[in-house]
Amino acid sequence: MSALHLRIERLLRRPDEVRAIVPWWSRLRARFFGAGEALRTVALEDAASRAITRETWPAHASALIAELEHNVDLLELRVAAGEHVPGEELVWLASLHRWIVRVEAALDRPHALDRLVRGLGRRPLDARPGPRAPRARAIDALLDEAELETERLGRRQRLLEAARRALLDDASPARAAKSMVAHELAQTRRMIACGVRAEIDLSHQLDGAIARRAPVATTLAAAASYLGAHHDARARVLDPLARPLRDAPATEAIPPGLAARIERAYDDARARVERDLESASPPRALALRRHRAFVAEGAHLAAMRAMLAADARLEIGGGLSQARFLAEDPRDEEVAFPAERMRLAHVRSVEDLRDAVIDDPRRVVHQLASGELLVRRHLRPRRRDDARSGASAEVRLFLLDGSTSMHGARARMRDAVILAELAALMERLERGGRVQQLLYYRFFHTASEPTRRVRTVDEALRAIDDVVGVERSGGTDIQRAIVDALREIEWARRHDVALTRAQIVLVSDGEATVDPSAIVSLRERLGVPTRVAIVALGGEGPGLRALAEAQRRDGARVFYHHVSDVELEAWERGDDAASPSYAAQTPPWDEIAALLPASLVADDPRPLEDALAELGVSDDATAARLDAMRRDLRALEARFDRWFPALPSGPDTLAGADDDDDLSRTLDAIAVLETLETPGVPPLERMADAITVFVRVLHALAITPERYADLIARHPARLAAPLGELRRRHRRR
């Protein structure tokens, strides 16, 4: 492997040496017989399609190394023969070689191995040689930034959610990337659920937990070991802490109280079915027996595994959104004439003498000079509406298909979608906040059930019993269900002026005809912006995809998911959830007492900025993160305005072919930044993340900062609208 590393480095950095080493007859043979031979990926595809464990790795390793050596031989011959070898292929070989070496070193570390074979760390295993579209390269850059964030789980989660949105908007399947992001999101949320604080550096938390001998040190060490946030020298401390955790169940991310409530709901549903079977008619008994199998012993575990899968893999938008709204700002203004209200204040100038309170004319001059003279201030109420930006609640109505075709894993995932949303709502309600939190849901089959509103913890708990405990069957009328939901939103808008936006989340198997034009037409007539997000389980009717595309053409941001029956059954079994645990246990203090080195707190990154400045190198990505750490808002705003200036709109200038291509890639980069929007994130974090990700994406798209500045200067009208929208989303308001 060391020899292969040297050969790959030579191909990347010193191709002239390759030409000097390869004999002339090999160059001649490559020129006439080796042209057009593709790089081999058979062993790579085999390893990517199978589960890699400590036991199966030796067989995969030998095949991967042999294939890697063959590909290096082939590229050396191409370079020696004078052929052009794309840099992407060389970088791919280097990343694959580095991945193999890292897996070899992680075989005895369960968390580190899991990160390399299942999370973002396995990306070289799923990559293939060949050119990639600009949009795919931009998403890769976003994933790179998420992979490098190993300290703050909150930021890592935001970046992963942005990558999931970008992948969902991408037209290509990208199943491997979606699976990696889903796994990483599930792992990140498990860490947070098990005690890791999202917005505090992991190394700082670990250092404090060890100093306090706190049980949560086990969770923190496991998380640090998984993320690879510490150097190998520190692994000897983290591994003993993390080692006892590998056998805990994956459902540990479900809060214990919620897990108990779900289990009780399934127990009650099972008892209710048994009672109803005693007096049921034959047709009714058939449906009840089917429901009894659905709520059988252990079904609550499958439901919780499906909840974790839904939370990590499905993007249906957040309950909050950034919006610009008019806020009433009542104030009192001073007037020069008598008004209903009056107050006394100290005189500010000689002009105030006409309204002064004079009790002794002889003392006026003295009181005026000493500031003791009082004056009458007449007040009149004034009402002003200020345009403000902030987080606003989005009314969401979940339309859940309760037809007979939604059975087994489909019904489990349908229920999991609303159960995961109820769990998130309960968490937000318990945490508190100024924005009202609520959701609506409705089951539909041949006819629609009444809409249920959930806005308190007690209502959420009762909703869990309703979702799990009621047996549903019948036909499917998706068109009617969506139309009824839109009309209900229209009625609610007439009675509640605070309703400014709404979203319908349709969960169905799609086995019904839908008229997208009629739905879009009714949606456009509503007095409130409304979008219909779609989760198609098992089947996939063409009407639902057409409905999503029609809304996108209309400018609405909607999400469309299709999950096959094979995937649903795997999620229900939890095949993709067996990972090292993050549940806190009592650390083996006696075992690690002698291993504790100096403080585990990460080194201060500020000297890096000084070193770059001394070399004359500008690194705005690093500098933006440092500005956010120092809470230097003024410096960060200036940096943000330099990268994303406010441009004047107007007629566009003519662009050549080169400018058109670079402009298209720049717009792709800005579109990726649109996925970063997360309500409630502080302005410092929003602006720093925008700069950091944008610099990385531009680099991935081969656009230098100088070229980007040139495009802004030459084509301001083309970039004015997207940059203006980006400033509205990310800049401090």
Image: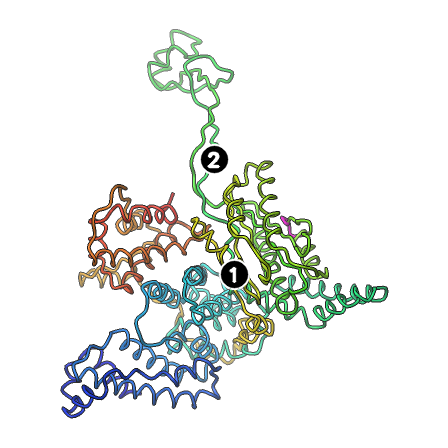
Query: At 26% across and 50% down in the image, what residue appears?
Result: 642
What secondary structure is marked by label 2?
strand
Image quadrant in which you'd find residue 227: bottom left
Name which residue lies at 45% across and 28% down: 384
Residue labelled with disc 1:
542
Q: Nearer the viewer, residue 362 or 508?
A: 508
Examine the rendered structure and indicate whether residue 568 appears above or below residue 15: above
Residue, far right:
279
Q: Nearer the viewer, mark 1 or mark 2?
A: 1
Q: Quarter of the image holding residue 473?
A: bottom right
Question: Can you see residue 694?
Answer: yes
Q: Is residue 457 magenta?
A: yes
Which label belongs to residue 217? none
Task: Give the image location of residue 170, x and y in percent.
Answer: 41, 62
Callout 1 amino acid: Pro
Query: What amino acid is labelled 2 in the image?
Result: Ala
* Comes first in the chain, label 1 or label 2: 2
Q: In the figure, residue 175 lies in which quadrant?
A: bottom left
Q: Is residue 451 magenta?
A: no
Quadrant including the C terminus: top left
Q: Which residue is the site of mark 2?
A: 327
Above or below, comparing residue 239 to residue 373 in the picture = below
Q: Residue furthest top?
A: 361
Measured as percent of width and height from the top left, residue 424 is found at 57, 57
Residue 62 in percent (x, y) is at 38, 90
State the extent of the magenta-drawn residues as a range: 454-458
